[in-house]
Image: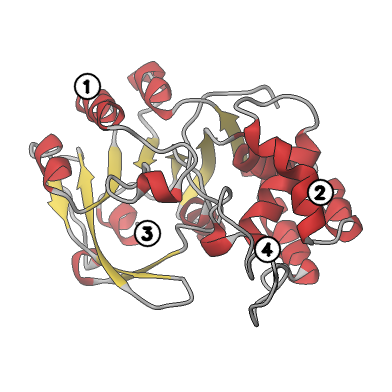
Amino acid sequence: MSQFLQANGLVGSEFVELYAGSAALSLNLLKRGDVRSVLLFERDPLVFAFWYCVFNQAEALIKLIEQYEPTLKTRENLRSLLELDDVSGDLLLMGYAGLLFNRTSFSGVLHAGPIGGAGQKSRYKVDCRFNRAEIAHRIRVCAELAPNVSVYFGDAVQALKDAKSSINDSRVFYVDPPYYVQGPRLYRYHYKFADHIALAQALAAANYRWMLSYDDHPAIRHLYREFSLTQPSLRYSSKVPKKEIELLFTNVKEPNFGSEANAKWSVARLELGHGNAVRIAR
């Protein structure tokens, strides 16, 4: 993405990431100075709450991390928060729950079972990915970017429809929706076919710049057949190294993808799941 921004004269833009998830791309671009500010959108209440707390209540979130043990009992005590469909109650506790379930669940999927299973008979225990000191350090590093980050909750497609070109001339929208094939398995807020169509219609009507990332599927190729396409080789950050074909579409006229078409991108897609969005007052 950095090369894409540079090649198309978009360095210094405001970067809007509509399915925040791990937010790795946005925050890396901001830290590198490739973009001037970031707007993160997220539909999953727990993922939204986590990022909201990182950029608004970082030290309070770290205190919870230090206070609670990442155990099966803690997971069970907070399991009811997985049933929330909206932002309500204690945002700080919701944010901690989002982190806990991400770091203690299989593959980082919030609604998956615990690492090591219910019996904890595996060599990998439920807390094996919950290094509190390292997590606290990462939160503080992210929190340093707070003056240039805004976090919103709601639906991504509606946010795209609401976006006005008059205030988006200096923005780039990055759209990374739930996987078409594996979405139901990986994401709590996955898309049905009608949702994928609604997203395609919203982007087709958009008069501002966007880049879209999707898994490779004939239906997706068909929905976005009118837009520029490139296919970088992606290397995913998971326990088992793997390569996947990813499709990158954009409505930027005559885009220059630089060398990204043949580059290997490191993607931490499962770090905090995926979602959609709209604004909540800070």
Front-most of 136 and 69? 69
Name the kind of residue labelled 1 in the image.
Ala
* Residue that mark 4 sits on: 118
* Residue that mark 3 sits on: 2
In the image, what residue occupies the spot 70% across and 72% down? Answer: 120
- Residue 231 x %, y %: 18, 60
* Quarter placement of the C terminus: top right
Comes first in the chain, label 1 or label 2 = 2
Q: Residues within 10 Å of mark 4 (few under 14, many from 20)?
A: few
**In the rendered image, the vertical position of residue 72 relative to residue 93, given as above or below:** below
- Residue 80 x %, y %: 72, 36
* Residue that mark 2 sits on: 61
Name the kind of residue labelled 4 in the image.
Ala
Residue 147 visible within the image:
no
Residue 205: mark = 1
- Label 1 close to label 2 by CB (< 8 Å): no
Question: Circle 1 — which element?
Answer: loop
- Label 2 close to label 4 by CB (< 8 Å): no
Name the kind of residue labelled 2 in the image.
Leu
- Label 4 close to label 3 by CB (< 8 Å): no
Cα–Cα span, label 3 and label 1: 25 Å
Comes first in the chain, label 3 or label 2 = 3
Front-most of 263 and 3? 263
Comes first in the chain, label 4 or label 1 = 4
In the image, what residue occupies the spot 67% across and 26% down? Answer: 87
